[in-house]
């Protein structure tokens, strides 16, 4: 792999919490990626909602396929910038491990339940999963990943929480940036979901061409595609338009970031951490992305069918939380080992780890007993 001086280098990693001997066949970031793929939390992403709950249909994205798409985009961008692809992949595959069942509605509901006990942030939860909750190894808790992967996973964090997180929380206090690899995954995440939510929205029948043509980038690309092909099915038009939009957005991201790197000329990853964020789209494309975000919010995320699902999800999380408050015995012992001060955190860990299906089944069980 050809690496730029500003890229993260696995041999110069800031290391793992518990010291381990090096792998002979894999670099540090490949090893981290493999640990993530073999974790139970990673497998559970398959049955967690992205936007559409799992039982709505098999053709929609789950958190798992979302994470794979983020990894693909991030790797493609990293390659053009001579950044470390394996590190991007590891961060991308782990970035949503802390998500609750039922997407954002689930996260908001759990945060509400946990408000008196320190709240619930899915980013911190992802870190908690890989640092503590995974039980894979005899000699340490968690997956013992490198600093660079952990830094990339912790995208946001409140100042209050940052103070309790040691070195990994420092950048939120100093207002520094993470590595370029982490910045790439962060934007790849947004590009991935804006793109696939339009696609899933269209497949679900909630979005149609008439609505989508409100988006300047969609409309212009549609005109371009029709100039070449005039007898495609709607599905073919949709796929070709989205493919071209993606290509444009990703190429623009690479080009604009290259321009920023040239301008600021970082010579090491620690330079990157001190500089403003370098991974970005041009203003024109950033405006298009903003338009897509507002469009999806208006027509998709707040659509009555999605809203109904979100309301149901919120209720489910709330009922589960209240149930466990008085039935802590129903939570497996393995969840109770790490939490010294607050048993509510045990409940949050347990609920956050559930798949949509498991949470729904548990709800049915509770309701049939009462
Ligand atoms: Mg994501």
Image (cartoon, grey):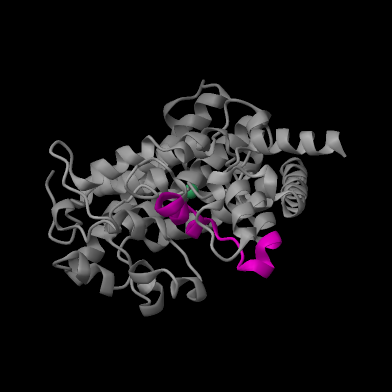
Q: Quadrant of the N terminus?
A: top left
Q: Is residue 102 left or right of residue 46?
A: right
The answer to which quarter of the image holds residue 57 is: top right
At 44% from the left and 45% from the top, the residue drawn is 134
Q: Where is residue 324 drawn, in percent x and y?
A: 72, 50
Q: Which residue is the extreme one toward the right?
A: 370
Position of 332 relative to 113 (above/below): above
Q: Please state which of residues 114 and 87 is positioned toward the viewer in this rendering.
A: 114
Position of 20 relative to 197 (above/below): below
Q: Is residue 237 left or right of residue 137?
A: right
At 65% from the left and 35% from the top, the residue drawn is 358
Question: Total marks drawn?
Answer: 0
- Dominant secondary-structure state across the stretch colored magenta: helix
Q: Where is residue 218 drawn, in percent x and y?
A: 52, 43
Can residue 92 be seen from the camera position used here?
A: yes
Q: Which portion, as a residue range, is magenta? A: 112-132
Q: Quadrant of the C terminus?
A: top right
Q: Where is residue 243 drawn, in percent x and y?
A: 42, 35
The answer to which quarter of the image holds residue 152 is: bottom left
Q: Which residue is the extreme one toward the bottom?
A: 174
Q: Please state which of residues 293 and 160 is positioned toward the viewer in this rendering.
A: 160
Q: Please state which of residues 71 and 199 is positioned toward the viewer in this rendering.
A: 71
Position of 79 relative to 265 (above/below): above
Can residue 222 be seen from the camera position used here?
A: no
Does the magenta-highlighted stretch encompass residue 19? no
Q: Where is residue 252 drawn, in percent x and y?
A: 33, 52
At 16% from the left and 66% from the top, the residue drawn is 268
Q: Is residue 157 left or right of residue 107?
A: left
Does the magenta-highlighted stretch encompass residue 129? yes
């Amino acid at each position: 792999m050809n690496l730029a001086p500003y890229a993260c280098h696995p041999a110069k990693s800031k290391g793992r919490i518990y010291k381990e001997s090096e792998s002979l066949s894999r670099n540090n970031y490949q090893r981290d990626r493999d640990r993530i793929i073999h974790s139970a939390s990673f497998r559970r992403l398959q049955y967690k909602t992205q936007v559409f709950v799992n039982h709505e249909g098999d053709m929609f994205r789950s958190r798992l396929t979302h994470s794979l798409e983020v990894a693909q985009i991030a790797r493609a961008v990293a390659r053009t910038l001579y950044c470390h692809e394996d590190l991007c992949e590891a961060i991308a595959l782990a970035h949503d491990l802390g998500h609750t069942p039922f997407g954002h509605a689930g996260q908001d509901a759990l945060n509400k339940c946990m408000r008196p006990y320190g709240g619930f942030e899915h980013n911190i939860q992802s870190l908690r999963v890989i640092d503590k909750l995974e039980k894979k190894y005899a000699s340490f808790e968690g997956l013992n990943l490198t600093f660079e992967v952990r830094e990339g996973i912790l995208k946001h964090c409140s100042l209050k929480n940052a103070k309790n997180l040691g070195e990994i929380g420092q950048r939120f206090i100093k207002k520094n940036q993470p590595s370029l690899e982490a910045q790439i995954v962060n934007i790849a995440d947004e590009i991935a979901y804006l793109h696939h939510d339009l696609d899933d929205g269209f497949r679900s029948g909630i979005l149609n061409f008439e609505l989508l043509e409100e988006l300047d980038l969609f409309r212009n690309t549609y005109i371009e595609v029709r100039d070449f092909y005039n007898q495609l099915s709607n599905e073919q038009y949709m796929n070709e338009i989205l493919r071209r939009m993606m290509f444009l957005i990703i190429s623009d991201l690479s080009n604009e970031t290259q321009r920023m790197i040239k301008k600021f000329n970082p010579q090491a990853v620690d330079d990157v951490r001190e500089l403003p964020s370098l991974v970005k789209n041009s203003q024109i494309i950033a405006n298009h992305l903003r338009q897509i975000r507002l469009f999806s919010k208006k027509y998709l995320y707040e659509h009555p069918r999605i809203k109904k699902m979100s309301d149901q999800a919120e209720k489910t999380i709330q009922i589960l939380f209240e149930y466990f408050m008085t039935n802590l015995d129903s939570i497996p012992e393995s969840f109770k080992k790490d939490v010294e001060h607050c048993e509510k955190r045990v409940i949050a860990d347990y609920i956050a780890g559930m798949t949509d299906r498991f949470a729904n089944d548990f709800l049915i069980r509770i309701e049939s007993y009462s």
